[in-house]
């Protein structure tokens, strides 16, 4: 992930060298766990609305606090799903128990090993189109992105990625509104739209550098990809790796030359990862959408299971989750549609 300031690159080089030296010193010590990436949450954003009440949690995967940062831990063999449940009136349902859910992998029922319904903090990458057509839209888009953070968990860690034909990490993980605002204001509206590259590299960065297990990418764009080295199919494949993020997309496509293709791309990245794609008719709708995204994230269930087919056998696994409750009619569960076990090798440009 590129940064505009080369000082960061020097720091990264120093830390990498120090890490290599340290690993050589510890050579011969078996089963040493890797150290956590150095990404810390800073000052909390404005207080959000009350979070959903906690439900039963698994004792196998206790949570902890590292330097004041909430860390959700999972076992290596466990698959973790973040699921939103909707009733037949399109209302989010937040009162279900573990026994109301059934999980299937490749059509085979799985045993749920952990279950939570709490407002779990997330590592979020906000990825904003910086191409020339976005110049006049950025003030309202930036305001909406900040309002999303204000409506989110105060312990979230958020980074800002601006992209056009290239992509830049303009603010590393923080929950400080002022710093996030500065990152969003680094506008150089020019060039094309390397949407797929920006989203997948942000997902990679979340996986490598974020402390928090639950990961989200919010992408806001007004155009179709015309600059990425990767294809849409390659991008979706990368996003579906085990532990990949949930993608939410806001497509401001009212003047897009190829709206059907642009819409399909955002829908595919979102639906395959358990997120949502929104297509507002006017720019004024973006702020309300951003707040609804925050509500969706904070209302999810976290469901873990150990797959009956071990992860080390690799391959793509289809996932389906059902929910039933006597208190409700038909329920729809939105979560990722599948994942590549064992970390599918990346394809496309590196």
Image: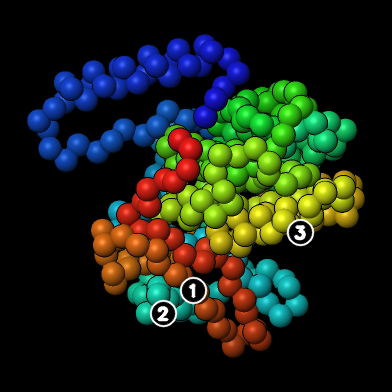
Q: Position of residue 296 (x, y in %)?
A: 66, 58
Q: Are marks 2 and 1 in contact (CB under 8 Å)?
A: yes
- Left or right of residue 16: residue 1: right
Which residue carries the number 2 mark?
Answer: 107
Residue occupying the point 56% across, 39% down: 229
Query: Would you call the spot at circle 1 few (<14 residues within 10 Å), some (14-19), or many (20 or more)?
Result: some
Whether the residues at callouts 3 and 2 have beta carbons within 8 Å, the answer is no
Q: Quadrant of residue 185?
A: top right
Q: Earlier in the sequence, mark 3 or mark 1?
A: 3
Identify the residue at horizontal 35%, vertical 58% (top origin). Answer: 341
Mark 3 falls on what kind of element?
A: helix
| Residue bearing the label numbered 1 | 320
Answer above or below: position of 147 versus 109.
above
The tag on residue 260 is 3
Find out whether the residues at labels 3 and 1 contact each other: C-beta distance under 8 Å. no
Marks 3 and 2, the one that precedes in the sequence: 2
User: Is 205 situated left or right of 62 in this image?
Assistant: right
Q: Earlier in the sequence, mark 2 or mark 1?
A: 2
Mark whose residue sits in front, 3 or 1: 3
């Amino acid at each position: 992930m590129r940064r505009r300031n080369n000082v960061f690159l020097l720091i990264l080089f120093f830390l990498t060298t120090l890490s290599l030296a340290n690993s050589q010193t510890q050579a011969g010590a078996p089963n040493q766990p890797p150290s956590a990436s150095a990404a810390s949450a800073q000052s909390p954003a404005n207080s959000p609305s009350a979070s959903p009440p906690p439900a039963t949690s698994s004792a196998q995967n206790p949570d902890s606090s590292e330097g004041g940062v909430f860390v959700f831990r999972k076992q290596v063999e466990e698959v973790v799903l973040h699921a939103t449940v909707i009733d037949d009136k399109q209302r989010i349902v937040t009162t279900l128990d573990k026994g109301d859910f059934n999980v299937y992998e490749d059509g085979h029922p799985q045993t749920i090993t952990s279950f939570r319904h709490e407002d779990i903090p997330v590592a979020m990458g906000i990825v904003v189109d910086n191409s020339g057509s976005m110049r006049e839209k950025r003030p309202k888009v930036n305001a909406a992105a900040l309002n999303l953070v204000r409506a989110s968990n105060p312990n979230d860690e958020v980074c800002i990625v601006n992209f056009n034909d290239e992509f830049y990490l303009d603010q590393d993980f923080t929950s400080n509104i002022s710093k996030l605002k500065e990152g969003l204001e680094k506008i150089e509206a020019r060039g094309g739209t390397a949407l797929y590259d920006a989203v997948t590299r942000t997902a990679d960065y979340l996986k490598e550098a974020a402390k928090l297990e639950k990961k989200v990418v919010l992408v806001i764009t007004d155009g179709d990809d015309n600059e990425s080295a990767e294809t849409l199919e390659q991008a979706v494949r990368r996003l579906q790796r085990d532990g990949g993020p949930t993608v939410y997309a806001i497509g401001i496509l009212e003047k897009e030359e190829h709206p059907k293709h642009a819409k399909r791309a955002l829908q595919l990245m979102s639906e395959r990862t358990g997120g949502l794609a929104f297509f507002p008719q006017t720019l004024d709708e973006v702020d309300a959408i951003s707040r609804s995204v925050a509500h969706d994230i904070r209302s999810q269930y976290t469901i873990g299971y150990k797959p009956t087919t071990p992860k080390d056998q690799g391959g793509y696994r289809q996932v389906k989750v059902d929910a039933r409750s006597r208190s409700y009619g038909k329920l729809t569960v939105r979560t990722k549609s599948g994942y590549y076990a064992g970390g599918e090798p990346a394809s496309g440009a590196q």
